[in-house]
Image (cartoon, grey):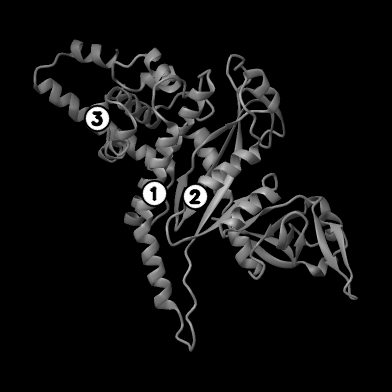
Amino acid sequence: MPTPIICVADPLRHFAEAFRGCFTKRQWKYFVTVLLALVQCEARHTLTALLRTVGEPVSLSGLSRFLSRASWSPEAVAALGLTRFRHQMAPAVAVEHQRQRAQRPHRPGRPTATQVTGYLIVDDSVHEKPKGNAMAGLGRHFSPTDHRIVTGHVLVTGLYRLLGRRCPLPVSLYRQEAVCRREGVPFASKVDLALALIEQFEPVPDTHTHLLIDSWYHNRKLSRAARQRGWDVSGGVKGNRMLRQVDGEGNRTWVRLAAYAAQLPPEQFEEARWPGADGGRRVYVHAVRTRVKGLGARQVLITLPERNAPLSQARYFASTRCEASIEELLQVLSYRWAVEVLFEDYKDLLGSDQYQVTSAAALVRYWTLIACLASFLDEQRAQQEEASGIPITWGEVRRDLQRQHCRNLLTWLEHQFRTGATVEALYERLAA
């Protein structure tokens, strides 16, 4: 049964109120409609299916105009979401600094400065649209999930992880150079979009930021941008990277990372555990502190699933934290998986790849509203975890909201019947 806006759960209503200044009165109604529909919809998240879950007189053409041409700014919505996150996390950061100071050992000299680290994770995700010929921005992209080239859109975004909380970052649509020429828009590479995200990002005050990226984004441009802001950088690198090797006589040469790994005997790899929710998995790691061409001083990690595994199974990582232990670096590198979980939730939970909008502006706005709802789900997840002491997922938060909406709907129907409403009148309203 469709759910009227009046039945929205209190937490979601209060969250939507915080964004009222980004919209006109009419636009705000569409904003709440989309948030409620994304929570309630269990079918494919097309605009028609979204409207069917909300019992309000909102037209499909009106929703299309809200996403494509209405005068609201997705940048303003995303910026307000980040501001809200910073305000929420500032007290928690202060408490963490105080906790570290209380546990700091008393010794002569200047005490070690406390540090709270937030992790900025940047990545992209392919959204396959095999039948979207009329859609703008459509290109041919390699899908790591399917291991093939598909027709679709590429979402470039990031995730900010701090003290157990996650904040989705602004979204961008990547278009290939040929697509940009065809549509008459300026070309920006994935690296350019990631660079803009890094340069515009403002972390929570009194925190240190650590940028986590995969091998596609681990290059000179992004590393320099991060280092200029005093951030650390860690992530995967490709085996064709050149690293400096020093022999016993002090001679320096450059060697490919894969070639360096090939000459290592098995005993050079030490056993460690790659962290995970299930206790982690065993890996064998070789660490070397050196310089990587184009990146500078790095601690390089080479991992294998077994000591005698073939080189084709090796994975390579590099980090500016040259003095960190292997265990510390593996823990940091494992945090990058959070962005993969984000993309999975975007697609499976909120239908970020099920849209049927045709313009690039509407697509970015639709993704922005999904990111906005995702930030709300994480707020509720953190609150419920603190109250219950057990891990909670966004899916469980969404199901709890659905139960609240169902309860509110039954209460509203009872009130309508008690005040003389007829079945026919309520049917006409909810079936509109």
Q: Quadrant of residue 339?
A: top right
Q: Nearer the viewer, mark 2 or mark 3?
A: 2
Q: Tag 1: residue type?
A: Phe
Label 2 and label 3: CA atoms lie apart by 32 Å
Q: Tag 3: residue type?
A: Cys
Q: Earlier in the sequence, mark 2 or mark 1?
A: 1
Examine the rendered structure and indicate whether residue 327 appears above or below residue 198: below
Task: For the C terminus, give its image quadrant.
Answer: top left
Could you tell me which secondary element the residue under label 1 belongs to?
Answer: helix
Examine the rendered structure and indicate whether residue 110 appears above or below residue 171: below
Frontmost residue, 423 versus 253: 253
- Mark 3 — residue? 7
Task: For the N terminus, give its image quadrant.
Answer: top left
Which numbered tag is attached to residue 160? Answer: 2
The residue depicted at 31 percent of the width and 55 percent of the height is 387
Q: Residues within 10 Å of mark 3 (few under 14, many from 20)?
A: many
Q: Tag 2: residue type?
A: Tyr
The residue depicted at 43 percent of the width and 72 percent of the height is 100
Could you tell me which secondary element the residue under label 2 belongs to?
Answer: strand
Could you tell me which secondary element the residue under label 3 belongs to?
Answer: helix
